Image: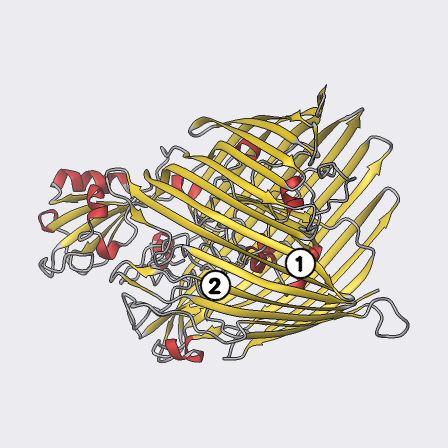
Amino acid sequence: MFRLVTARVEATACALKSKVFILTLVPLLLTHSVAAQEGQADTGTAQRDSPEGQAAQLDVVTVTGTRIKGGASPSPVVVIGSERIREEGFTDLGQVIRSIPQNFSGGQNPGVLMGNVAGGGLANQNVTGGSGLNLRGLGPDASLTLLNGRRMSYGGFVQAVDISAIPVEAVERIEIMADGASAIYGSDAVGGVGNVILKRDMDGVTVGGRYGAATSGGLATREYTASAGTVWPTGGVLATFKDASVDPIHARQRGYTAQLPDPYSLFPASELRSVLLSTYQTLGDRFDLQIDAVRTRRDQRYEYYYGTRAIYNLLSPQTTTTFVAPSLEYQFGSWGLTLGGAWGKDEYLNRHDEVSAASGAATPYLYECFCNASRSAELGAEGPVMDLAAGEARLALGAGHRTNEFSWTNLYAGSEVMRGEEASRFAYAELSVPLLGTETGRGQQRLELTGAVRRENYDSFGGVSTPKLGLTYSPSKDLTFKASWGRSFKAPTLFQQYRPQIVQMGLAQIYGSPAAAPDALMMIFAGGNPDLSPERARTWSTSLVVHPDTLPGFEAELSWFEIDYAERVVEPIGNFYEALSSPIYAEFVTRSPSADQQAAAISDASYFFNFTGVTYDPSNVVALLDSRYVNAMKQRIRGADLSASYKFDVGSSELTVRGAASWLNSQQRTRGTPQSRDLAGMLHNPAKLNARAGAVWVHGGLTASTFVTFIDGVTNPSDGIKGSSFTTLDATLSYRTGERAGVLSGLDLQLAATNLLDWEPPRYATISPEYVPPYDSTNYSAIGRFVGVSVSRHW
């Protein structure tokens, strides 16, 4: 993994080799329900059964984006319930998050090409086979993932979180807030937060199976699931098991990649086993105990070539994720006190062999473990502090401690390449104050102000304070206006801080200086930086929600957001092949470095590699590239989200028409470069416009849905050519028999098809057409038409 070089290193040093990696966005648009905005945590459908002349009342629940029970998040929240997941044929949470317009499918996601052969960046490739939330395309480590409100452990060297490790069969709903939330949750919640809520009311046993395949070849999928649950007057338990295997898609199976050498994986083969257990129990009159536990193991296999057709790279990684989160809640009067904790571990074992294309003989190359572990404990309280004319003012406050560990071990050599650990202490407070609740001719007005602040102290870089202010105003029961402003941050990952520093020699002609002498050398300095400071962001959003009382099944929301993101941690030279020719890298390039400058770089590094075949001579080095991690990037992200839904009766049937769209504009510049360059709409970055719209028809036990997804084209910066857009048509047909006599009782049958028209991904001119697939795998899929059938039965 890491930066691609043309020579090979001995197995004991291979764990330090850098290669180059890539970015996919398949946004599907799901409507923000007013219920989500107003705090109703159901399946995304608004419930407004309040008496005539009154505004909608809130259920007493805690929603994502606030710790106040019954409170309203001042930021837009998308809620996707289990029924919607079934209606649209999603089989794992990775598909769910890739379906919303605010999320970018680049980063850590299956189907994104491995090895960074297309130059999309270290973080944008399929490493573990999992699916990482990547809101606004800010990176998989800038979106926070929670399970029942508890932070999950990082995974892999990019230290993303695999949301697909949670079995979809156990999910009641997922709530996604695409707005800064560090004042509520701490580090990583810059792009936003996704919170997976598990079912608590399953009673009985359900077993099921699914088979599907791409009609153009490959991706044969076999899934077997079992879920069991029961409830009793004081508690309940849920257990799920899933076994899934997926065949690869090879380049030879698609006409637009047939020129690539065989074998070459566009989509990896994988096997998954996952177990989840969730239980809760009331202890006496005041105590509630809950425990959630997940364990997932995923094995992958994929092949790719780069640099030579004589040898191909065979990767067969194994990733094991374990997570346990207990919590105990004590109720005293109208206040609740919660003591919670979480322990997580993610082991990514990367086995990499080099295989002779002629003989098939495999030579061990890498065998390494990227191992993450986390522990946290938190004590929180929430309750009313004052009775006002408009309602109760409520306060939530708490404190806790969290540790993260990361180690990189060369298992062939039996040596530890690096180890890092950090600890942080935090305290937070959030206040909700209702200011207005007066009667008007149109109904009840509502005005509520919220404020939150959080302080985190890290043992590495010190303390960070993040405030957030919010406003929710309903002039009538037909409209709701929301606005929020806040600050968020992301701590540098342990990989970014402690990755070993290396010096690597290269030929200047390859790295952007074609006029250089054939034996002219350049020196690359890369690695971690323990002096990194946190990334910081200022965020604000505003939204208007329309839910007219005269049209009870209609909901619509328009949102505007802005993120000013500074001190971003980057490897400043993103494309080494343009390192000496592109002006955006000039501040990190030292031309004609002195012998003393070169000696200082070599002295600071842990390893020195010369892969050129040319003897190192300081007088022959024409440039020194400093690509160590540094706080050097600024980004400005802004855009708009629009969603709408209308549910109405058609005779004895029910029809729901819904759709959403997201427009994104993002730019970035490095520290010493005055001019910004576009990100959104460029290759390996989110498309500027994503949209999805469709309809769901329900008649008794029969449900049919069809949706159209649109992804705008992206521009290749190397030639300025914008590719075509990508439009797919998806359809799902399902039937539930319900309870009846005989073997047909409790059956659920489903037929689902994605990309019915079998559209191929748009092409672009790659830097190495003999090795790189000619499509942007971070935005567009190579799967083509996929048809799957599933059956399950409930007892």
Judge depth for marks 2 and 1 and give the one in front.
2
Q: Residue at x 34, y 62 (%)?
A: 118
The circle drawn on residue 710 is 2
Left-right relation of 498 to 598 = right
Q: Seen from this angle, which residue lies furthest front?
A: 441
Assign a secondary structure to mark 1.
helix
Residue 372 location, x and y as percent? 52, 45
Assign a secondary structure to mark 2.
strand
Res 61 quadrant in image: top right
Of the residues shown, which amino acid type is indicated by label 1? Arg
Residue 201 location, x and y as percent? 79, 50
Res 403 quadrant in image: top right
Q: Seen from this angle, which residue lies furthest right?
A: 741
Q: Which residue is mark 1?
A: 84
Q: Earlier in the sequence, mark 2 or mark 1?
A: 1
Res 683 quadrant in image: bottom left
As rendered, which of 350 and 333 lies closer to the eye?
333
In the picture, which quadrant includes the N terminus?
bottom left
Q: Is residue 769 above or below residue 40?
A: below
Residue 682 location, x and y as percent? 34, 56
Q: Is residue 438 visible?
A: yes
Of the residues shown, which amino acid type is indicated by label 2? Phe
As rendered, which of 791 and 720 lies closer to the eye?
720
Left-right relation of 315 to 431 = left
As rendered, which of 13 and 294 lies closer to the eye?
294
The answer for how far apart the CA atoms under marks 2 and 1 are is 20 Å
